[in-house]
Structure formats: C-alpha cells, structure tokens
Amino acid sequence: MTTKKTEKKDAVAHLAELIQGIKVAMMTTVEADGSIRSRPMWTQNTDFDGELWFFTHDSAPKVDEVQGDHHVNLSYADSSRDRYVSVSGVARLVRDKEKIHKLWDPTLKAWFPKGVDDPDIGLLCVKVNKAEYWDTPNKRMVQLVGFVKSVLTGETYRPGGHEKLDLEDTQSPMH
Amino acid sequence: MTTKKTEKKDAVAHLAELIQGIKVAMMTTVEADGSIRSRPMWTQNTDFDGELWFFTHDSAPKVDEVQGDHHVNLSYADSSRDRYVSVSGVARLVRDKEKIHKLWDPTLKAWFPKGVDDPDIGLLCVKVNKAEYWDTPNKRMVQLVGFVKSVLTGETYRPGGHEKLDLEDTQSPMH
C-alpha cells in the first residue's frame, strides 16, 4: 500500500515536471457521432495533486461533450524541447464560486469580459488516470506508474501488467 | 456544386497553410474502454489533398485502436506562433508498398532500423472531415468550410448550420 502511494506521488510529481512551462494543452473530447475534437485550453496554476483545472464557459459545446462522455485527453506538446505528453482522464464541471475565485487570473478577462462573477463561468476539473510521455533520447513511450486506474470503474491500482513498467517500449512513438 | 468544390479546395489549401511547419501532430484515438490517448506522430510531406499520411508499425497498439474506432483527431500546436489546429478525420491502415516507398524518408530509420522494407511498416491515412483552428487576434474558433462531412455516414456537404460559417464564434476558445 505504501508502495502504491509512493508510486502515485512520484507519478504526480513527475507529470507536474513534464507539463511545466507548457501552458496550453489541447483537450480532446468525443462527440455524440463518434468524431473527436480538440481545442486549446489554458492549464490553471495549482499545486498539482492529480487533477488539472481549466476555466470554461458553462455554455460551451465541450461542456456538453464532457457531460455525454467524461473521458478527455490532454496533449501537451512543446516542439522546442521535443516534449510530448498524453494525459488521459475524466472531466467534470465544477461551479464552485470559491474555487473559481481562487483560480481566477486577471488575464482571463480576455475570454470572460464580465470578470470573475460572469454567471457563465465554470471550471473543468480533469482527474488524471493515465499519463504517458515520450522519452527524447530513446524516443520511446514511457508510462507514468501510478496513473493507471480507471476512475470510472473505481478499481484501485494493482501493480502488474504493462502499467507497472515505467520505462517500457510498449509502443513505438512517433509512428 | 461548383461552390462546394471551391469551398473544399479553399479549405484544403487553408489547412495545408495552417499546419505548415508543425511537423509533429498529436494523434488521438479512443480505446475500447472509452479512454482517450494521444501520441506524437510525424506528418509526412505530401501534396495535401484532404488526406494526411503517417508511418506506423503495423503491430502498434494505435493500429488496433484505429481498427476498432476509425475516428482520430490530430492536434497541431505551435505555441511560438500561437497556432492551434484541430483536425478530425477517419483513419485507415494502408500497406501499399509503392506508397510506402514513395513517402519513405531516410530519417525514418530511427524508428524502422530495418529500413523501408521492414515487414512491420504501414501507413495510417487520415481522411480529414472537419478542421478547426483558433484565430490569434480574436482568439476565436474558426471552422474550415468544406471539411464538414462525415465520411462514415457518406452524407454530402450541405451548406447551412454552423458548419457553413467560416468565422463564427461557435465556441469560446482556450476555455
């Protein structure tokens, strides 16, 4: 149990490092007809503890998409550092005014001209359950230990299988 | 009809311009359990005519994912130019040796050490049916007219609805 907790903690810290400095993620959702869409999203600065936060308009189509299918993916790409990170998770809409005020940043006024009290403001909270990145020297996919369980099924992390490996070539990257 | 063809041609040319210089796309697929994954992929240089080509190992997990659900998304992100493009389409595996030879580039040896005749080489061809990008000055989502067809349903493009608009704020970007 301690090992699991440690692994999870390490994975959280590691993911935080990986996406550090990549402000804009592409968030992918699945539409009702099965097509897949992505759009740029600003990751809000928080002490990352396994959840990522994004401001959204409540009325935005992606909120509907998230309601229909909680699964999302966030891709963080930084070509200048040759860094590519895939973050899989489940999203939920949060309308907690206190949290909105806590995460509010004045630059957000570009999209919410009414300011922090705009009634259409919401937050998308993505609980990460899997993360992968590409190790530059070897160009191999690396899976972050600890982020391996489906939150939806409620199963706990069990070491074993390919998820346990943190530096395995489970997939040829870039191809 | 001519208008439709012109729109499609314009959209193709426009999308080619938008992704120009963004060599690595994040390709998103949906897994059997509904979770969404992405991975970096090199876009092969071709005269873009509505299809994008990528080299792949036939045995890669994403090939299975594509067989199960043809839908894919390609996100092209270039933070230095503040350019973000979402490309939705359907993928198919192509094992045509002639095409493989035509698109082969010696730098691919990093991933296919056996070279162009590696029996595990395949191509993923993505037929684009929707593309969106974010217009920097206004930070508004722009939908490319012409790429509005579901290849799967076989429906033809009908002007009308939000797809017809090429500069409409159908969605608040970044949020």
Image: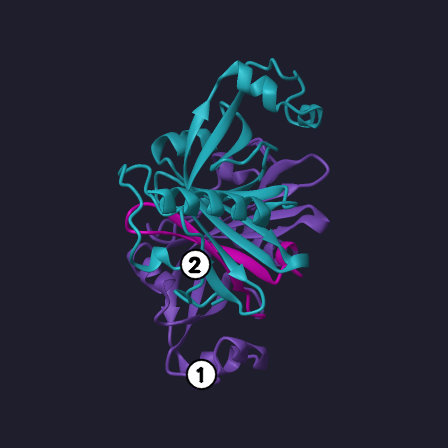
Chain colours: A purple, B cyan
Residue at the spot of label 2 = B166
Which residue is situated farthest in the front direction here?
B2
From this view, report whether residue B20 is shown above or below residue B55: below
Residue A34, image x, y percentages: 32, 45
Say if B67 sits above or below A92 in the image. Answer: above
**A155 or B156, which lies in front?**
B156
Residue A98's tag is 1
Quadrant of the image containing the C terminus of chain A: top right
Q: Is residue B2 magenta?
A: no
Query: Mark 1: which secondary structure?
Result: helix
Residue A111, percent from left and from top: 50, 75
Crowding near pointer 1: few (<14 within 10 Å), some, many (20+)? few
Figure quadrant of residue B166 = bottom left
Magenta span has A34? Answer: yes
The chain containing the residue under callout 1 comes to A
What amino acid does circle 1 point to? Glu
Give the CA separation, mark 1 to mark 2: 37 Å
* Labelled pair 1, 2 in contact (Cβ < 8 Å): no
Q: Secondary structure at mark 2?
A: loop
B18 relative to A37 in the view: left or right: right
Disc 2 marks a residue whose amino acid type is Asp
Q: Residue at x 66, y 58 (%)?
A: B81
Q: Dot 2: within a 10 Å radius of its alpha carbon, few (fewer than 14), some, or many (20 or more) residues?
A: some
The stretch of residues the image draws in magenta is A18-45
